[in-house]
Image (cartoon, helix red, strand yellow):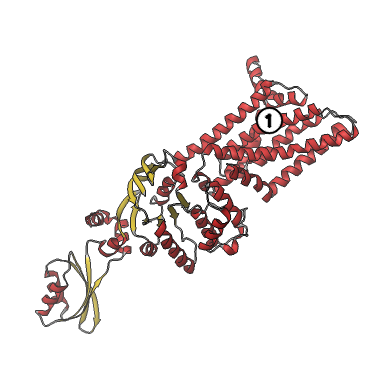
Amino acid sequence: MIKVKNLSKSYVKNKALDDVSFSLSEGEILGFLGPNGAGKSTTMNIITGYISSDSGTVEIDGIDILEDPSAAKKKIGYLPEQPPLYNDMTVQKYLEFMFKLKKVKLPMKEHIDKICETVKISSVQERIIKNLSKGYRQRVGLAQALLGDPPVLILDEPTVGLDPEQIIEIRKLIRDLGKKHTVILSSHVLSEVQAVCDKIVIINNGKISAEGMTSDMTHTGSSTQRLELIVEGRRQNIISILTKVDGVTDVTDQGECEKGCYEFAVDSSRDVRRLIFRAIAKTDYSILSMKPVEVSLEDTYLSIISGKAEEVKNNVSDI
Amino acid sequence: MSAIFKREFISYFTSPVGYAVLAAFTFFSGIFMWVYCMYPGTSNMSGVFQSMFFIVLFVIPLITMRLFAEDKKQKTDQALLTAPVGIPSIVTAKYLSALAMTGLCLSAFIIEGITLSFMSHPDWSVIIGNVFGMALLGSSFIAIGLFISSLTESVIVAGIVSFAVNVLISLLDTVASTIPADFIKDMFSSLSFQSRYSHFALGLFSLSDVLYFVTLTFFFLFLTDRVIERRRWA
């Protein structure tokens, strides 16, 4: 549905995008993650045809955005970072304007009413946009993107400025929309991307640092597995036993938790739970607790952003 | 295109700008009407049109300053540029909305002409010719204003710069008269808006004057289109 190939874009001094490629099939929701200034908005602006890339191509449903911009743009609903609202218009008049601007061929009144209901702005339809709160403005922006039922939705930080209840509503809405539409959304809220998206692209300094399915990223996104262990016995001996177990890469002493019991964090390159159990069982020490720590998207993300990118990237691409 | 035209035209009246412009225009044309026609007791409106030149020069930047600068500032240009509409259509729609607003202002002269016709027999061909001339003048000022508005994000800067540029182009022949070289003097005075426009005000209709204003309009609309296109690549 969306094919982005080798996009590069430089501004006067810095390189905003460097050889960015990814693709997305119909009905998928892609999350675009990255710190501020990573190139998320730039990529989205290029996909929607707002700005042009220096090199590379964007295809929407087989149509190149540069070759036939009108046809490609008709297939996209775009909610930019700051919703493009005319402050002097009422919500209704604004949506009517956008409806005509996008040359939508549906019955206008019913279509607008339906969308207003979907994003829950029916109650403010007659109000002037200038007087709306941030949350409502964001939703009017979303309504505008939905006009004409475009097969592709591009949403730049759609939940910014909303209260927690609204955030949950909008996320649910996006997930529902994802059943019929292909969605790209950007965010720096990790839990949001994890909750909503099927696929994740992490972008940093204009380059794609990692790409993969959400489930892969969250479970095995990092190359190390971690166990949290509480063992009763002599501290030094336990550490030396643990470090000798095959596969263990690092043992961190986390201190005494109960009298005579110590807590350790064990990093390993593979599953070492059975080996550790047997190793400890050979002594007269006892394991009181052993808990695998699931690597969250946050850990993956932070390790990528903080420069362990290569390691993770290799790992993810293996999947 | 019609959607943008309609929106822009209506927006003149959802803010005080449209009313202020109309008020200023009718107020001054009324005063000049009194000074040049009513008081001396003549139906010759030449003086009115001659004097209105500076009012048009002042009013048009108020009409055009917002058109692109505001879009850029409010980021509504993202809505326009990501919609299935080409940049030339956007530029044309905005130009036409400003032209329509100017046309509304010019209708004041028709009303004044009708008022005169109750008291005497005004020469309608001169009045229509003059309104046409003023529309052409306005059209060039609009294109210039639109171009300057596309260069900046600040509405105020767009307004002030447009005003300054309009004054400069209009007074080219005054500037030219101080230059000793004859060919420069001729060139400047043939480019001056005021000398071109004063032909209309005197009731002289010349094709070269019409072509001059039309060409200028197209030239600046084309430049506006280029500026916006270029911004996408910057």
In the rendered image, which residue does mark 1 sit on? Answer: B136
Which residue ends up furthest to the left in the rendered image?
A282
Task: Using the rendered view, name the quadrant where residue A35 is placed.
Answer: bottom left
At 17% from the left edge and 72% from the top edge, which residue is drawn? A273
Left or right: B45, with B232 as reference point: right
- The kind of residue tagged 1 is Leu
Find residue A182 and report its image quarter.
Answer: bottom left
Give x and y (percent) for residue A112: 55, 56
Where's the C terminus of chain A, which quadrant?
Answer: bottom left
Query: Would residue A18 be found to the left or right of residue A91 on screen?
Result: left
Asked whether the viewer can see residue A24, the reply is yes
The answer to which image quadrant residue B210 occupies is top right
- A290 in relation to A309, above or below: below
Percent from the top left, x then y, of residue B171?
Answer: 69, 27
Camera-side residue: A319 or B2?
A: B2
- The x, y position of residue B130, in whole percent, is 75, 29
Near-viewer residue (A38 or A176):
A176
User: Which residue appears farthest toward the bottom when viewing the image?
Assistant: A259
Q: Numbered disc 1: what chain?
A: B
Look at 47% across and 60% down and name the residue there. A160
**Above/below status of B103 relative to A20:** above
**Image position, residue A3 (x, y; %):** 35, 47
Residue A187 in sight from this viewpoint? no
Q: Tag 1, which secondary structure? A: helix
